[in-house]
Image (cartoon, coloured by chain):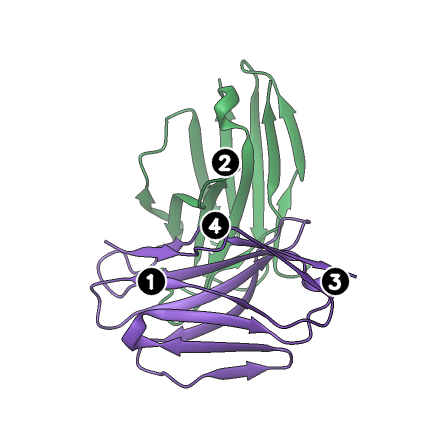
Amino acid sequence: ETGVTQTPRHLVMGMTNKKSLKCEQHLGHNAMYWYKQSAKKPLELMFVYSLEERVENNSVPSRFSPECPNSSHLFLHLHTLQPEDSALYLCASSQDRSGAIHEQYFGPGTRLTVT
Amino acid sequence: AQKVTQAQTEISVVEKEDVTLDCVYETRDTTYYLFWYKQPPSGELVFLIRRNSFDEQNEISGRYSWNFQKSTSSFNFTITASQVVDSAVYFCALKGSGGSNYKLTFGKGTLLTVNP
């Protein structure tokens, strides 16, 4: 595997379910990100991890819970979601947290539908 | 506050036409970075280019070219001799050098459709 991978690619879940999204980067990067992409809206940054430490939580509801066990893996744990949480969830990584001269590389995303 | 405006929501062209996607940005940082990403129907955002604020040289990569003009705060993207495979949503993004210097501010994107 190369680049940034995400599983599953598609997920349909009920409002009472618990599920997890997984992201893995094979680029040796130190920072990882979760974004939400809804129809007709700009990409929204949700969480940022640098060297496994959360450095940004962009006012995301607690029904989204991130986990970064090491610099290559990032999870997004989901529980009691709402229909408006249906979106494309994108994971990204960059060389380091500042990323000032290191662009972010994105995975293919997980298309989440909450019923 | 940072802001990126992509005024063109959708553009439709015929194959082999040239097309320019506009991007206007706002930032108070004196040092900043601009990016273009391509998002094909598969969903993955593909990095195309990064431009530093202190480097106003335009860049050409094959059929792609970028025109960075600080005087007008614009970073436009031109595809020459467009092809059907160029059909995608294109995002312009901005990163400052202040406190949240890891944060990318994205525009809303421009959907480009290239018809055969």
Q: Confirm whether circles 3 and 2 share one chain.
A: no
Q: Which numbered disc, 4 or 3, marks the residue closer to the eye? A: 3
Chain assigned green: A
Q: Amino acid at mark 1?
A: Tyr
Q: Amino acid at mark 4?
A: Asn
Q: Mark 2 — residue?
A: A76
Q: Quadrant of the C terminus of chain B?
A: bottom right
Mark 2: amino acid = Leu
The label number, if any, that marks residue B84 in the structure image? 3
Q: Residues within 10 Å of mark 1 (few under 14, many from 20)?
A: many
- Label 2 crowd (10 A; few <14 / some 14-19 / many >=20): some
Question: Residue B102, image x and y in percent?
Answer: 34, 58
Q: Pointer 1: what residue?
A: B25
Q: Position of residue B6 (x, y in %)?
A: 43, 56
Q: Are marks 4 and 3 on the same chain?
A: no
Check whether the beta carbons of the residues at disc 1 and disc 3 lie within 8 A of each other. no
Does label 2 or label 4 sit earlier along the sequence? 4
Rendered shade, chain B: purple
What kind of element bears circle 3? helix
- Chain identifier of the residue bearing label 3 in the image: B
**Position of residue B34 in the picture relative to residue B82 (left or right):** left
* Residue A27, picture quadrant: bottom right
Q: Nearer the viewer, mark 3 or mark 2?
A: 3
| Mark 2 element type | strand
**Residue displayed at 47% across by 61% down:** A104
2 and 1 marks in contact (CB < 8 Å): no
Mark 1 vs mark 4: tell me if same chain.
no
Earlier in the chain: of badge 1 and badge 3, it is 1
